[in-house]
Structure formats: C-alpha cells, structure tokens
Amino acid sequence: MSNVSLHISNLLDKMTSTDKDFRFMATNDLMLELQSHSLQLDEDSERKVVLMLLHLLEDKNGEVQNLAVRCLAPLVSKVKEPQVETMVDTLCSNMTSDKEQLRDVSSIGLKTVIAELPLSPSGDSTQKPVQVLSGALVSFHSSLLSSLLPQLTSSRMAVRKRSILALGHLVPCCSPALFSQLTEHLLTELSKAPPTSMTRTYIQCLATISRQGGHRVGEHLEKLIPMVVKFVAVEDDELREYCFQAFEAFIRRCPKEMSPHIATVTQLCLKFMTFDPNYNYDDEEEEENSMDTEDGPDEESDEEYSDDDDLSWKVRRSSIRCLEVLVDARRDLLTSFYSSVCPALLARFKEREENVRADVFAAFSALLRQTRAASSRRGLGAGGEEEGEEPAVVMLKKQVSVIVKALHKQLKEKSIRSRQGCFSLLTDLSHTVPGALETHIPALIPGIVFSLTDRSTSSTMRIDALSFLHVLLLSHPPQAFQPHMQVLLPPVVACLEDSFYKITSEALLVAQQLVRVARPLSHAASPQVFPVTLKRLKATDIDQEVKERAISCMGHMVCHLGDHLGAELPGVLSIILERLKNEITRLTAVRTFTLISASPTKVDLSPVLQEALSVLASFLRKKQRSLKLSTLSCLTALLTHHAASIEPAALQPVLSELPALVDESDMHVSQVSVSLLTSMSRACSSSLAQISSSVLPGVFRLVHSPLLQGGALASILDFLQALVVSNTSNLGYSQLLKALTDPFHSSQSSLLHRQSYQSVARCVAALCSSCPSEAPATVAGLLQEVKNPGSPESARVLALLCLGELGRSSSLGGSKEVQGVILEAISSTNEEVKTAASCALGGVAVGGLKDYLPFLLKEISSQPRRQYLLLHSLKEVISACPASSLSPHVESIWTLLVQHCECEEEGTRNLVAECLGKLTLLNAEQLLPRLRQQLRTGSPLARSTVVTSIKFTIVDQPAAIDPLLKECIGDFLETLQDEDLNVRRVSLVMFNSAAHNKPSLIRGLLVSVLPHLYRETRIRKDLIREVEMGPFKHTVDDGLDVRKAAFECMYTLLDSCLDGLDVLHFLDHVEEGLRDHYDIRMLTFLMLARLASLSPAAVLQRLDRLIEPLRATCTTKVKAGSVKQEFEKQEELRRSAMRAVAALLAVPEVERSPVMADFANQIRTNADMASIYQSVQGGEGGAESMDLS
C-alpha cells in the first residue's frame, strides 16, 4: 500500500508542475492506474486525487482538462461515497461559474460521474424518489421554458443546438398551454424576419418539437405551414433543408391534419428535388437516350462540377426524404403519387450525388412497398374476387420500361452503393409486379454478370446481385432466361466455388433455379453446375446453410436432369441417403427425396430405396412435427411413383408407426397419414392385411371425432373407397359398414357428437359409390332402421342422414316408400329425428330433382306446421344443385319464397332469406332486380327478409353476381335509414358481411354510409323502457342489438377498409362504446387494441380521453351479494380492458403521456390490477415490464 501511495503522491506532485507536458503525462499515468482493477487507495490518497482532478478541470490547457474529465469515470468506482459527493458538489457549483469553458467541462464531468454511479439493487427503492422528482419537476416546466427560449438566440451554435434538444425533451411532458406558448413564441419570432442564422434555429426547433410532441402540433399546423413555406423561398440551402425536415416531421406526426397542405408540400418537394444550380444534366440525358455505356466522361464531369461549398445536395436530399415519408404516410393518395411523384423520382435516378441517389432509390422503393401492400390487401380483402388489377399496379406496369432504362447504365457503374440501390429497387419491383421484367431481362443480365465478375466488387455486392437474380428467376417464366444461360452459368458457377459461405449459399439458390430453367438445354447446364454442386454436397466441414442448400440444389438437379447424370446418379443418391441419416440435415434430405421421387424423368431409386424406407419409418416416431409431415409426404410420393420397386415387407415398419399418428390431437398429421394409407391401398394393398387391428381402429375413432371436417374428412373418404376396392381380406364392404355404424347402436351412442353423424353418413355414401351393387341392400336396411320403432334414436338419425347422402350422390328414384318414410320422420316428436329427416329429404331431392322437388314445394305450401323443416330441405336443394339443373324450377321456387317473406316467425324468415339469396346466385341478372323491386314494395318484415337475402349473395369466392351487386348494393344499404329498427339491424348485418367477405363492394360507399353507421352507435333513450317483473323493475334496451351490430361493423372495417376511415372520428365513437353495455365494451376494447397497432398516431391524439373509461372499468367492483355471473362478467371486462391497456403501452412514445404514465403507475402499485395485467401478458414480465420512468 505504501508503494502505491508513494507512486500516486509523485504523480500528484507532477500535476502541479508549470510545464503543461508534465501535467499531461502525469494525468495520463494516473488514468492508467485508475483503470487497473488491482489499484486500492487509502482514504487520504482518495481525497488528494479527487481534489487534484477537480482542480485540473480549471487547467489552462484543454488537453489536460479533457484527460481530467476522462479520469473521473474510473475514479468513481475507486473512491468511497463521501468523495463522490465532493465530486458532484464541486461539479454542480462549477456549472454556475461565469467561465463558459469551465461550465462546459463540468457539465461533461457531471454527466460522466452520474453515468458511472451504480444503480440501486432494488428497483423499488429508487422508484418512489423518481416518481416524486418527476412530479415535482412539473411545477418547474414554465421556468425551464423561460430559461431555454432566450438560449435560442445565443451567439454560439452549440448552445442553440443544445437548447433545441432540451426543448425537445420538455415538449412530451409539458402541459398543452406551455406547448402552445412555445409554438406561439416560435411563430412570433419567425414573423419578425430574423437573420437567416436565427431563422434556421427556429425552423430546426419547430421540426424537433414536432418530432417529440407528436399529435400536439396538429392544432397549430394552420399557422405553421404558411410560415415554413415562406422560408423555403429564401435563398439559403441549409434553411431550405431544415424547412423540408420540418415538413417531414409534420407529415410523420400529423398525417391527417396535413391533408389540406399535402399538395403544397408535394409541389415544393418536386421543385427542389431537382435543385442543382451548379450542374448541367443536358449532356448526360443525351447519353442516356443513346444508351451509351462509357463512364469516363461522366466521372470527369462529376469532378469538374464538384464543389465543397455547394450545399444544394442537402436540399435535394431533404426534399426527397420528405417525399418518402409522404408516400409512407398517405397510402390513400397512391394513385395520385404515380401521376406526380413517380415520374419525378424516375427522372432523378440520374442524380450525381451518391448519397442523394440512394435516397431517390429509397423513396421509389417506398412507393413500390405501398403498391404491394395495396395490391395484397385488395386480394385478401376481396376474398379472391376478380375485378381487375389495383390501379396503382396498372400505372406501375406502364413505367417499367422507363425504370429499366434509367437503371440499365447504373448497374455497370463502379459505385457499389449505387448498384446495391439498383438491385434493391429491382427486387422490390419484381415482388410488386411479378413477371413485369420479362421483356427487359436482356438489358438486366449484363449488369448482373458485371457485379458477379468484377474483381473490385465486394462480397456484399455479389450477394445482392445473386439475391436479385434468384428473385428474378422465381418471379419470371423459365423461357425468358434460356437464351442467356451461356452467359449466366459461368459467373454463378464461380460463385459456387467462392470461399465465403454466404456467397456460396446464395449461389446454390440461384443454381437450383437455373437447373429448372435449363431442362430443355440440359446438355449445357449439367457439365458446368453438377461437379461444383457435388463438391459442396460431399463436403462435411462447411456451414450448415451451405450443406442444406447443396442438398436441395442437387435434388433439383437430379429431379430435372436425372436422365443426363448417367453413372454419377447412384453415387449422388448414396450421399443424399447419408445426409438423410444425419440429424442436422435429415429434414432437408427428406424434402429432397420427395422432390426426386416425383421427378418426371423417372429416376431409378432402387439402389437406396429399401434403406431409405427404413430410415424414413424411424422418423415417424420423432417429436419434430415438420419432420413427421415431410416424411409422410415423402413416403406417399415414393408409393405413388415407385410402388413397383417396394416390397410389402419394407412397409411394415412404416405401418407400425402410423397408429400413433392417426389421432384427433393433430388433424393435419392425421390427414397426411391417412393419405399415405390411401396410397398404400392403391399401390401395395397386400401390405394392409394387418391394419384392421392396428391403424383402422384409429381411423374409425377419427371418423367419430367432433373435430373431423374439411381435408381430413376428404382423406378418410378417399381411404375407405380405396380400401373397399382393394379387396383386402377381412376389410370388405360389410365389415367396414358395420365398424362405422356399430357405435350408434350401443349404449354409449349418447356420447357421440352431432358432427360424427354427418361424417359417418358421408363415409357410408362413399362406400356405396365404390360398391354400387351393395347400394340397394344398404338403402333397404336404412329404411327399415328408420321405420323400426325399436331402433335407438341415434341409429334412426344416422340412417336418415345416410339416406340423404346416398340420395345426393345417386338418385333413389321416385320411391313412394322413401318419401313416406322421410315424411313420417319429419312428423316425429323427436327434434333430432325431424332435423335429420329434413336433411334427408333435401339430399334425396338433390339426386332426384324431377321426382322430389315438385313434391317438396307442394308440401311447403300445404303443411304450415312442417314449413320450417321443409324450407331446410329446400335450402339443401338450392345450395347443392347446379344452376342448369335447377333453372326449370326457378320461377316456382321464387314465387313460393316471396309468398313467405312476411312470415311472423323470424327463424322461418331467415330461412326464406337464405333460400332467396342462394337462388339469386344461380341467376343474378334475372333475380337481383326483383329483389330490388321487392325492397321498395314490401312491408318492414318483407324488407328485412330481402336485405338478409343479400347477405347470402355475398360469398367469399369470386361469383358472377359480384359486378351486378356492386352496382346496386347502395340501394340495399339505404335501408340503414329505414324507420323500422329491425330492418336497420339486418341492414347492418348485411353491411358487415360485405365488409368482411368482399370489401370492394362497399369501399366506394363509405362516405355516404358511415354517418348512418355511426348514428346507430349512440344510445337512444327513447328505446329504453322499464318492465315490471313482480316486485322488481327490469330495464330493457330495444336499441342494444342495433348498436351491437353497428360496433361489429366498425370492428370489421378496421381490417378491410382502414384507408377509408377518418380514424379520429372513428375513435370518437369507440370512446362512446367504452361506456356502453357489457357486450359493446368487450368489442370496443378489441377495437382499441387493434387501433393501437394499426393507427398509433391517432390513438395517441385521443389517449387522454380513452384512459378514463379504461381506468373506470379496471377499478369498478361488483356489489357484494351479486350473483356469480355478475362477478364473472366484471372479471372478463377487466381482463379485456387490461388487454387494451397492454396494447396501448406497446405504442411508441406512449410513455410521454402523463395520464398514461399515471394509470400505468396505478396498475403497478395496485396488487389486484397488477395481477390481471400479468395474467393477460401471459405471465411474462408481469407488471414490472411497464417501466414508464
């Protein structure tokens, strides 16, 4: 210790030397000592070192001062708390000194010391003081503002910049009054026409407070925009740059409020993005027109006009960045951008400054991204409807040739950044409009080859070029590349041999696609690509990604060129088999085997097939789901294409693993497993001799599962048909039929789900269709089952459903017995039997339209008591019959349905409406005008039926009625103004269906429809009444169902038509819903959470008003003595409200809201609310994750 103290003492003595070099060296040595972990100071040495370093902060030499400041950081951890307090006290007092340099140095020193101070081990111990301090600082906001504003006029640029930063930090947490005071001050100062340097500061400050203050700026934009526009005209490049930065901040933070000024800002951006007074582009344009590719003169020209004092590039860059933000923020103006912004950006591809040119590419890429988003949203929202391309895509296609022409030359420039920008832009273009570059590929190939072969090209450049080539190959037809294979293959092969694994990996993806392209030219591709790929395939000491892509690439080569590989093929297959046995590469190898097995070149897999089957069977017991699915697909492909080479014994290991996979816990795995069984039944039926005791019980359990539907059910139907045809012993028609129907005759039949009845009925019909000779006996047995009064209910229901399915697939003829049995069942006292009989009658009518439909229509007219069930049968007929079969009966059906439009029973009216809608789909041109006419002439009940019928014409698939419906749906939506409450409700339900399934039908009507929709969200007191129930009074709200329908429409519009909504106006009605009935509040909580991610800026603007109803819901408690349901409803409300709060807390910059911070603190400190928050967050992080400090 004494030696250390002596050494430190000597250093301190040298620090007092008059020679600045001595002081510098001694301070530097002290810093090295302090950075040593082994250094320990005694109390006296601590005090002396601290005092000396604080003294050196006032040293006349700047370098010594800087070293002294740097020493403070390691010193903090070496000294005790009293010395740290001395340091902080001294530094704080220095900051009030008259010496400006000392103030600056001390502020840096204080920042350094505070940064090095250890945090408290417990967050709770610091949380309270921080909260108290933040609350106390609120009272100083006004003083802070008063102190900072004069600093904006300081003569020192550094002070002005720091003042702007400080104001930026003050803005988010200050009161609206202070924010207005700050804005008014800036406007006042700018109106005085200050010197240009001061104007720059004020404009910079405006941009900063707009970025930090967000939506608050919106209410001041009417005054700010004209002021900033005025200063753009001032001949000062830096000032113009700051003006465009301010526009950028305004657009980013207040896109809606900027709407009236968008045209002005756009014009200014378009004007100044070409502002380059020191350069003449005329010569360059002439060269471009002639497609001259010589670069030398251009470079000399660039150097000739280069000038360090020329700041015009900053103006161009800031205006282009402003345009980029504008394109990102206003997707609704996309079409107009293609008329104005797109040509201007294309013209600037010739920009001489590399940095600015990169921003031009970025802005154009933003335009492409928005186009892609609009196109995908149109496709998803329309449910696949065909109504032409997105207008923006059509306009973009017209510009493709101009884009390629503008980029053609730059793809060969020496500038790597420019080429990367070109490839990025072209990649975005290929994703946005696949196939658009087909005719321009000859112009693009030289640029790609140049980037792949240029020796000066970096690895990143080659990766970008390969990535673009890969996208180009995927998005364009193979024949477009076939003329260029001789040019493309050599550089790609060279990249395959590159030592950098990322280049090799990307090149393998490209080679994989080139092999597909090369099939007609296989003689040229195989010798070049195969040896290099084989080398990568054999290597074991390479990157995992390269291994996987080498396997995949070789798989494609064998698939497409296997007939040209000759003697090399067995060796390649052996290597892929080895990779199949490797745990790391097995998944890729399985997929490769699947590809090879389905090859059109009929690759001979016999050398590896038996061993591969054994390995694949072992994969079926692995836990990795993707591996199981890929293995099942591979086995199915092998059985489909190579059954002749497979011995039945080789499939036994596979069959032994399948029972565990056929289970309702994973329907997709079950579906693929059953598809494999189907392939076995067709290709190798002898291998299935033992499945009756192994796999088949699992298949039947699946048939009786309530979860079976869709693809899984279809796969089982195929399997049963293949199995009964295969003539496998013990698995004949009667055995399968018995296994399917036995559970419905047992004492456990009551446990069977309703869905299993439908599934078994379809299976029975499938078996009958494969064995037509068995059908008559089966039908007779089913009829006997229905007639037998001793049969259990479940067996009678199943028999009726089976009759319906059999009748649907093959006519049962006009059998009086079938009619009589079904009609008798419809008259049964058992509801399940009646419903099944209704379905059965509909099914047999589908198969025998001429025999059964007139009878059915007659029964509907003459049997009012059976009317509802018979209409169900009619609905089955209309839904299942093709238009050509039903057309002779359309008039009689229509007349019958119209007669029942005004039925008092709502359930019957809904059935009539569904039948009308489905019938209209069959002949829209004739029947849709009749519905419009019926809408004008009918009673309220008839109008509600007609409007409901329109809901059933809006299907989620393309339909012939779509263009006709689009023309007239506005007439049906006029019922939103109907006097009848029920008509308005069903109109809202129809509107919701249109918005969900085919939003394109109603997008153009939103302006006229939304006011009526919003009107229905309000609580109407005239619809609230009190009903006396004995001694109690019960409040009934007749308008509740209409309001729920309106809020459901609003929720749907968020997903399908967000661009057509004024989100702030929308939020006003969401706010009303937050205080409404339980069901409506649950909906609005969901909407709020959705809006927090879709439109965070608008949510922030309304945040203060939204928090209070959320807080009220979270803090409300149910009265003691309430029923259990009330407690459960309130708990669910609180959880839903807390989910909305969690979504709000995820919004960027939400922590700047004092109201939100206060509510978050309340949740954090309230144990009950904190536990709810933790539970809705999935238990991850809990309430402590809400750190808003």
Image (cartoon, grey):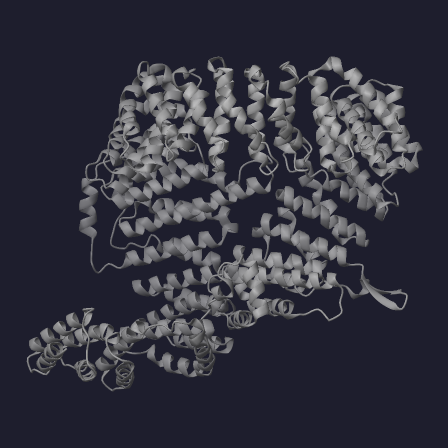
Image point (26%, 76%), residue name:
76
Quarter of the image for residue 369 reads: top left
Asked if one can make out residue 332 in the rendered structure from this viewpoint, the answer is yes
Quarter of the image for residue 248 reads: bottom left
Observer-nearest residue: 477 or 1044? Answer: 1044
Above/below status of 1080 relative to 421? below
Observer-nearest residue: 1179 or 248? Answer: 1179
Above/below status of 97 relative to 328? below
Residue 440 at x, y = what percent?
37, 31
Marker count (numbered): 0
Quarter of the image for residue 90 reads: bottom left
Above/below status of 381 relative to 218? above
Asked if one can make out residue 842 in the rendered structure from this viewpoint, the answer is no
Q: Quadrant of the C terminus?
A: bottom left
Observer-nearest residue: 198 or 432? Answer: 432
Image point (93%, 32%), residue name:
862
Q: Quadrant of the N terminus?
A: bottom left
Farthest residue, direction right = 862
Residue 467 at x, y = what percent?
34, 37
Residue 1068 at x, y = what percent?
63, 63
Observer-nearest residue: 925 or 579? Answer: 579
Image point (63%, 41%), residue name:
998
In the shown orientation, is residue 729 left or right of residue 564? right
Above/below status of 534 relative to 237? above
Residue 393 at x, y = what percent?
49, 39
